[in-house]
Structures are given as C-alpha cells and as structure tokens.
Image (tube, rainbow, N blue to C red):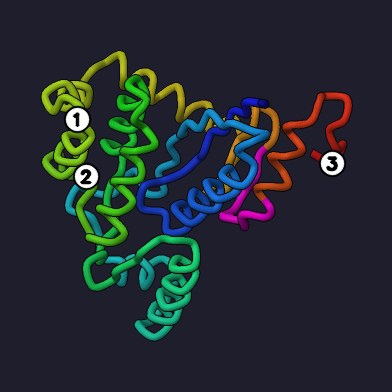
Amino acid sequence: MKTIKIEMIHDLVCSWCPIGYNHLKVALERIEDDVTADIQFLPFQLNPEMPPEGELIADYFKERMGWDADQLKKYQTSLIRTGTAAGVSYDFSKRTHYYNTFKGHCLIHWAEKFGQHRALNELMIDAYFTKGSNLSNEVVLLDLVEQLGLNRSDALQSLTDPVLLKEISKKQQRVATLNVTSIPAFLINDEYIVSGSNSPDFFEEVLMRFSLPERKKVSGL
C-alpha cells in the first residue's frame, strides 16, 4: 500500500474547493486497495482584508467583475448543478455573503493536531455553503469544533496562540513560494501541483501514477 501526501490549497469560501475536495475523495475511494492518502490543508485566503461582517456576494461580483443580477444568477445555477453532481449542496438563499476565513483556517490547522482537520473542513463546508453561516464568527466556529468532541476553550485560545499563528504564517509563506494563482490546488508529495476541481477520473489517474515505483512513474508528472 502506497501512502501519498496531498496538501490541498484552499479557501473556506471558495465555491470550487469543496467540489475538488469531493472529487478527490471519490478518486481515493476507488483506489483504496492501492493508495492511502495523508491529506492536509494549506490556507489561501481569497480576500484576506474582508471585514468580519463580510460582503454581499452580489456586491462582490458587481464591483469586481461587473456582473449584473442575471449574470450572477446564471453562474450560481450552473454552480448548483455542478455541485449537486459532486455531492456539494449550495443554498444561495442562505449563502449570501463572503466572509473573512482566517480564523477558520487557524482552527483547521489546530484540529490537525487531533486528526480532525478533515472532519472540521467538512463541517465548515456544510455550515457555509448549505447553511450560510458566518465562518468569521467565533461562536459559529467553536460550535463546529464542539460537534467533533474537541475542547471549545482550547480552540478559542488557539486563535491567539503565538505558536499556532506562527505555524499558520509559515503555511501561508509556503503557499506563496508555490506561485499558486487559482484554487483549489493540490500539492502531491511536495513535487507536483494539480490545479482545479477536476474530475474523479483525473485525480484517480494522477494518484495511481504516484503509486508506482519511482522508476516507473510517467515522466509527464
């Protein structure tokens, strides 16, 4: 059994990140007899200056993309269709804002110490994309932590822990060295970056190549 290290470069409000995450999970389920994955997360904040109260998605697209309501509606309808096929539920009647995601990334990093980072990421996906929760709100985040049986007080303290903040900073600096321009992206075994949400078939093909002995790897990777 080959163990592959996969670091997902993502943001918690990125619409395509949960699709890519689910496609990766499907691929790993298909090849579970040959490959096991050590999945970690690297933070990539799309809007690090976003205030805690967030910004309306409609305003965001209007100001940055020049989109009107019809253009946004068409995009969201297409996204819902793609997400549904991937097992991701988007409810834009509730998901109305983009939020600052720094605290959420900090808690996923903290949860990694307990092996609960993937579970917390999945709870955040549901909380934000389906329920529209504010992922910059500490109460919302700590409620999710508690659902996993983790200590609420310890989680709160971690948000101001200088050691943890330094570790997050190192992750951010590492992402910066990778010259990633879009997310999701997936760094495999510290050597190969896959960009985009892709398909389960694509991920399966790439990961199976990494399961081969070094001398038999396809040179195109």
Question: In the displayed image of the protein, which residue is found farthest to the bottom?
Answer: 70
Distance from disc 3 to disc 2, alpha carbons, whole Å, reads 41 Å
The disc, 1 or 3, on the residue closer to the chain's N-terminal end is 1
On-image quarter of the N terminus:
top right
Question: Which residue is under mark 1?
Answer: 149
Q: Determine crowd level at label 2: few under 14, some 14-19, many 20+ residues with C-alpha closer than 10 A.
A: many
> Three-letter amino acid code at disc 3?
Gly
Q: Nearer the viewer, residue 134 or 39?
A: 39
Observer-side mark, 2 or 1, equals: 1
Compared to residue 114, the image places residue 42 above or below, namely: below
Magenta-drawn stretch contains 21:
no
Residue 101 tag number? none
Question: Which residue is under mark 2?
Answer: 136
| Residue range (magenta) | 193-202
> Three-letter amino acid code at disc 2?
Ser
Distance from disc 1 to disc 3, alpha carbons, whole Å, reads 44 Å
The disc, 3 or 2, on the residue closer to the chain's N-terminal end is 2
On-image quarter of the C terminus:
top right
At horizontal 49% and vertical 67% (from top left) the residue drawn is 85
Tell me residue 139's x, y (percent): 11, 41
Tell me residue 57's x, y (percent): 31, 66
Distance from disc 2 to disc 1, alpha carbons, whole Å, reads 21 Å
At horizontal 11% and vertical 24% (from top left) the residue drawn is 153
Question: Which residue is under mark 3?
Answer: 220
At horizontal 40% and vertical 43% (from top left) the residue drawn is 45
Question: In the displayed image of the protein, which residue is found farthest to the front?
Answer: 33
Q: Left or right? Give the position of 164 relative to 171.
A: left
Tell me residue 84's x, y (percent): 44, 68
Tell me if label 1 and label 3 are in contact, CB under 8 Å.
no
The disc, 2 or 1, on the residue closer to the chain's N-terminal end is 2
Observer-side mark, 1 or 3, equals: 1
Q: Determine crowd level at label 3: few under 14, some 14-19, many 20+ residues with C-alpha closer than 10 A.
A: few
